[in-house]
Amino acid sequence: MKEKIIVAMDFPTGREALALAEKLRGLVGVFKIGLELFISEGSSLVRAFRSEGHEVFLDLKLHDIPNTVARSVEAALALDVRMLTLHTSGGGAMMVAAAKARQAAQARTILLGVTVLTSLDDGDLEKIGLRPPVSEQVGRLAELAAESGLDGLVCSPHEAGLLKKKFAGSPLVLVTPGIRPPGATVGDQKRTMTPQEAFSAGADYLVVGRPITAAPDPMEAAKSFWNLG
């Protein structure tokens, strides 16, 4: 089960991120480098993680015109990352361009389409001119991602069951952030579940941040997720 745990390395410096990654070596499957850390440290940090043998989930949520996204995907593939995100709301042409770039490179990288951020709920969708409920919007974007050739989806655990049923028999993988142990505070997330609930709903991978990285003993916290599937 430990290979299914992705740890969000939400630190201001690469030094801190690499230090924790070393402590968690062999205890989790993948380390997520997001916008904060990537903007601070750049691609050199990804190379440092890879040189140490750590698998990297590069969470940049690419969203631009098709050509720009395709070129950005090519640059990310050269870093040999395990996973890469792009926003499904960028449209079918953008996602097709990304999928073609990955296919041309014959890379192992899993392209993940981000559906609706776990910090948004039905009221937030209305405010930005989208029709709620969230579950319907997630379903629409998921269909478009699948048709465009992406390998998987990022969704809240609340939509994992819906998508697992919708794409039954499909190799699409589901990656779910918004994971909190029982009794933990939800922070800036709005659609959360416990690890047990998320796996039961159909999640293939869990993204876990503060419950591990801010724990008094991150190694023991990581181990606590091993037998939850």
Image: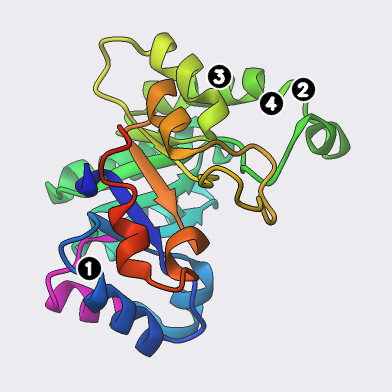
Hey, what amino acid is under mark 2? Pro
| Residue 127 quadrant | top right
Label 4, label 1: how far apart the Cα atoms are:
34 Å
Left or right position of 138 against 201? right
Hey, what amino acid is under mark 4? Val
In the rendered structure, which disc, 3 or 1, sits on the residue that comes first in sequence? 1
Q: Give the residue at mark 2.
A: 132
Q: Residue 134 carries which label?
A: 4
In the rendered structure, which disc, 2 or 1, sits on the residue that comes first in sequence? 1
Camera-nearest residue between 95 and 161: 161
**Mark 4 element type:** helix
Q: How many labels does the image show?
A: 4
- Which residue is rendered at x = 45% and y = 87% of the image? 13
Question: Which segment did they paint magenta?
Answer: 45-57
Q: Relative to residue 48, is residue 90 depicted above or below? A: above
Expressed as whole percent of the image width and height from the top left, the position of residue 1 reads: 22, 41
